[in-house]
Image: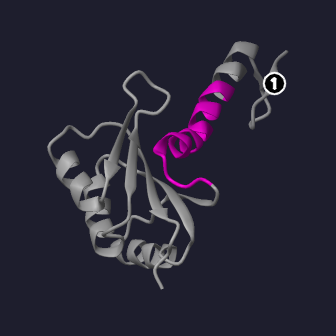
Amino acid sequence: MAGRSPQGGAIPPAEGVAGAAGEARAALQPAAALTASGLPADEFHFIGFLPHKSGQRRKKMEQLKSFAGTLVLYESPYRIGKLLAELIDLFPDRPVVLARELTKKFEEYLRGKPAELLKITSLRPRKGEFVVLIDNSRPAD
């Protein structure tokens, strides 16, 4: 059975299934990362991408410090080093998990404190978007 596109035209059945499968994979990535991270999953906050501008980004991260639970966000491979440097300043002793290439052949999880992960990622090629998980189960005062 064919579906309808947002523009009103018919979508061939195979194309609709392929599109739905791609959307489902993208939606499952944060849940898969949280499950495999080993971080507390009883309470978590999905943030998505942080703002690109430094001032807005810093303000958002300051707000996140008060959220109890695991923080889950996306980051580009081009900005992961910048994010880790910011985490060293804001969440220096928190366990962090970087999940990469989720639902793909070369799925990878890196675990450690922000400074350790910055050192590791600076020595490797940065490919694929990251799901970043921060254990903030005991938020800062």
Q: Whole-percent x and y of residue 37?
A: 47, 45
Would residue 50 be visible to someone looking at this image?
yes
Residue at the (41%, 71%) spot, across then down: 57
* Residue 63 vertical position relative to residue 119 in the rendered view, above or below: below
Residue at the (38%, 59%) spot, across then down: 95
Q: Main secondary structure of the magenta part?
A: helix
Whether residue 65 appears in magenta in the rendering, the answer is no
| Colour setting | one colour
Residue at the (64%, 20%) spot, across then down: 18
- Residue 97 is left or right of residue 6, and the answer is left
- Residue 21 is left or right of residue 9, and the answer is left
- Residue 124 is left or right of residue 36, and the answer is left
* Residue 43 vertical position relative to residue 58 in the rendered view, above or below: above
Q: Amino acid at mark 1?
A: Gly
Quadrant housing residue 11: top right
Would residue 79 be visible to someone looking at this image?
no
Element under disc 1: strand
Q: Which residues are magenta?
A: 20-41
Whether residue 27 appears in magenta in the rendering, the answer is yes
Q: Nearer the viewer, residue 67 or 52?
A: 67
Q: How many marks?
A: 1
Q: Whole-percent x and y of residue 100?
A: 39, 38
Residue bearing the label numbered 1: 3
Q: Whole-percent x and y of residue 109?
A: 37, 39
Q: Nearer the viewer, residue 15 or 103?
A: 103
| Quarter containing the N terminus | top right
